[in-house]
Amino acid sequence: SQSRIADLGERLNLALAQRVQELTKYRSDFFGKMREILGNRPDVRIVGDRFVLQSELFFDTGKADLKPEAQAELDNVANALIGLEKQIPSDIPWVLRVDGHTDVRPIAPGGQFKSNWDLSAARAISVVQYLIAKGVSPQRLVAAGFGEFQPIDTGTTEEAYRRNRRIEFKLTEK
């Protein structure tokens, strides 16, 4: 009985490791496609396992409505995701997480958003809704707002604030 349990545990671990390896392969494919799409733009960075795009590419200050010029970029991202959806076996649980981030400066009173958290979430949702409208499966998307709580630059200069206002794309497990 103990031997059988140990054998089952080993097989389960091997199966899980294989699934993680498969997702890693597709994540690598996704990164390659995204690099091609986004090119060598100075306003797009790869940080660890995510693509980081400055919010100014997508949104006007304090707004969550996509700029028209952002739509062309997102059309390319949508096409890459639709292609990826066809490649990855349906039993691999993956999503593209779209993260919205703001700087630490407070939202102006009386505006559309009550907090940076509201603004960051609304921006992530705008990107996700656009991708869905272009044919990406909603089951493969997650919108997350982080407000000002995960800065990548703790400085208090305009450049630091600009770097912290961003949208991140991360292909990950559900």
Image (tube, helix red, strand yellow):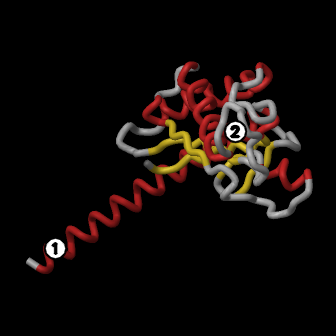
Residue at 53%, 53% in the rendered image: 24
Q: Residue furthest bottom?
A: 2
Marker disc for residue 47: none
x and y percentages locating residue 56 in the rendered image = 82, 36
Marks 2 and 1, Cα distance to the nearest angstrom?
43 Å
Q: Which residue is mark 2?
A: 34
Residue 77, compared with residue 171, is above or below; it is above
x and y percentages locating residue 75 in the rendered image = 67, 23
Q: Nearer the viewer, residue 56 or 5?
A: 56
Q: Nearer the viewer, residue 100 or 14?
A: 100
Quadrant location, the N terminus? bottom left
Q: Residue furthest front?
A: 110
Q: Badge 1: how crowded within 10 Å, few (<14), some, or many (20+)?
A: few
Secondary structure of the residue carrying tag 2 is helix
Give amino acid for label 2.
Answer: Met
Classify residue 59 as left or right of residue 140: right
Name the image quarter holding residue 97: top right
Secondary structure of the residue carrying tag 1 is helix
Residue 64, compared with residue 167, is above or below; it is above
First along the sequence among labels 2 and 1: 1
Residue at 46%, 50% in the rendered image: 173
Residue at 84%, 52% in the rendered image: 161
Q: Which residue is mark 1?
A: 5
Give amino acid for label 1.
Answer: Ile
Q: Nearer the viewer, residue 92 or 151?
A: 151
Classify residue 159 as left or right of residue 28: right
Q: Badge 2: how crowded within 10 Å, few (<14), some, or many (20+)?
A: some
Residue at 60%, 40% in the rendered image: 121
Name the image quarter holding residue 12: bottom left
Name the image quarter holding residue 129: top right
Residue 108, compared with residue 64, is above or below; it is below
